[in-house]
Image: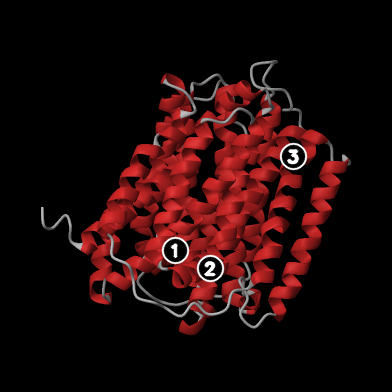
Amino acid sequence: MSKLFDPKTTLCIVFVAAMVMNGVDATIVNPAMLTISADFGVSPAATNLIEVGFLVSFAIVLPVAGWLGDRWGTKRVFLTALSIFTLASALCGLTWDLASLVVFRVLQGASGGLLTPVGMTMLFRAFPPEERLSLSRILTIPTALAPALGPILGGFLTEYLSWRWAFYVNVPIGIAAVLFGGFLLTADSDVEAGSFDRWGFVLATPGFGLLLYALGDGAAQGWTSPAILATGLGGLVLVVVLIVVELRTPEPMLDLRLLRDRVFGNATLIAVCAAGGLLGMLYVFPLMYQDAIGASALDSGLTVFPEALGLMLASQLVDWSYSRLGARRLILVGLVCAFVTFGAMSLVDATTNRWLVRLLLFCVGFFLGHAVIAVQTIAFATIDGAAMGRAMSLFNVLRQIGGALGVALAASVMAGAGSTQPAGTGSPDLAAYQAALLATTAFLLIALLVATRIQNADMPSLNLAVESN
């Protein structure tokens, strides 16, 4: 028992619990989207705001997570974020319409965005460098499996209980983790927080939110509707001002100057496009598989699961692949194969063998996983240690926003192609879903074009310490 109450063990337990909740929550709701659409009387395309709200709010808080942890203490910030995440999960389950669900989902994303960087800061301060490799091996398993298990758990809960349980499931875990951590975690020592980029945060929060809302709901409401024009133009103006401000700020929230580095800039753009294509596909496909093909929510979750298996296999083989193909060739081959696989998935219909569908999803994870992990490795090859933290924040924020953009644009294509009726109120429009899936290939095509600019001479020759997320 004494080992259980060791500060390092306590920290690992609380962190893993938080990461499992966060990881599962990123994917658990996808199989439930069609049921939510029917319950709230909205089109399947409109449910994209549930995912976009989570992804954008998650991304916006990432750059300020480190500052908040230093300013208020990592234990306090981590447990406060975990408490808010747990409360937001309960509120998501109690929602009465789409708007309320989106609001609480935004709250969930904002609190979830603090958990990983603040938690990792706590771990890196508690564990010396010689212990971190063993720590990483222990933490990789639950944090990698959580997003993979999300669709299965979401499908099971939706089919046999209610989609609301996809959110309620977090509540007991979150309460236990907060109480456990509150009593047993130790507070860290004071750290100089530095200056806070207020203008960057004030501009980014509404700017990205308004712009992505307009993109996601534009086709459903009409691109010329006053609400879409106001939010879209307002968001665009704020984002442009944000770019100007961040380029002139000495200590910006998002150091966009780092994108001038050729390797980092190209790798970041590839990662943004890959995230847009993947998350757009993972949003559209479960909807199509249930609404237009007639699968159950559980079957939809089980069908998507091989994508995670392919990603995990890629994470184990990428060291071997990288050493033989090199960074440029590995990224190009991975993106080409993923592009072809995405195209094949846009042809899936009710007559397609379900094991072939699962094989396609496995290939998505396998090929795109190779490309993305290689990109994550080369992205920071030319970044010096002093800029590493800012580069990591920028890379992850833009990747999250890329994922939100992919979901928003896929939903826009669905609505524009005809998928505007609430689920269960008319004949499912398979063509609209297929068009949305085909649109996600555009992200991979852009990534592929950018990858051709990478030169092997710029790339490191090393053994990969891969990440699977």
Instruction: Give how far apart the Cα atoms at labels 3 and 2 are.
Output: 28 Å
* Three-letter amino acid code at the position of disc 2: Ser
At x 70% / y 44%, what residue is drawn? 409
Which of 409 and 352 lies nearest the eye of the viewer? 409
Mark 1 crowdedness (10 Å alpha carbons): few <14, some 14-19, many ≥20: many
Residue 410: image location, x then y, percent: 67, 41
Chosen colour scheme: secondary structure
The answer, for residue 161, to whether it is visible in the render is yes
Give the x, y percent position of residue 370.
45, 57
| Residue at 48%, 72% in the rendered image | 71
Task: Indicate which disc, 1 or 2, sits on the residue closer to the N terminus.
Answer: 1
* Residue 170 in the image: above or below residue 81: above
For label 2, the residue is 393
Within-10-Å neighbours for mark 2: few <14, some 14–19, many 20+: many
Residue under label 1: 117
- The residue shown at (50%, 52%) is 111
Q: Nearer the viewer, residue 154 or 99?
A: 99
Q: Do the residues under discs 1 and 2 have CB atoms within 8 angstroms?
A: yes
The reply, left or right, for residue 385 in relation to residue 105 is left
Figure quadrant of residue 322: bottom left
Task: Indicate the amino acid at tag 3.
Answer: Asp
Question: First in sequence: mark 3 or mark 2?
Answer: 3
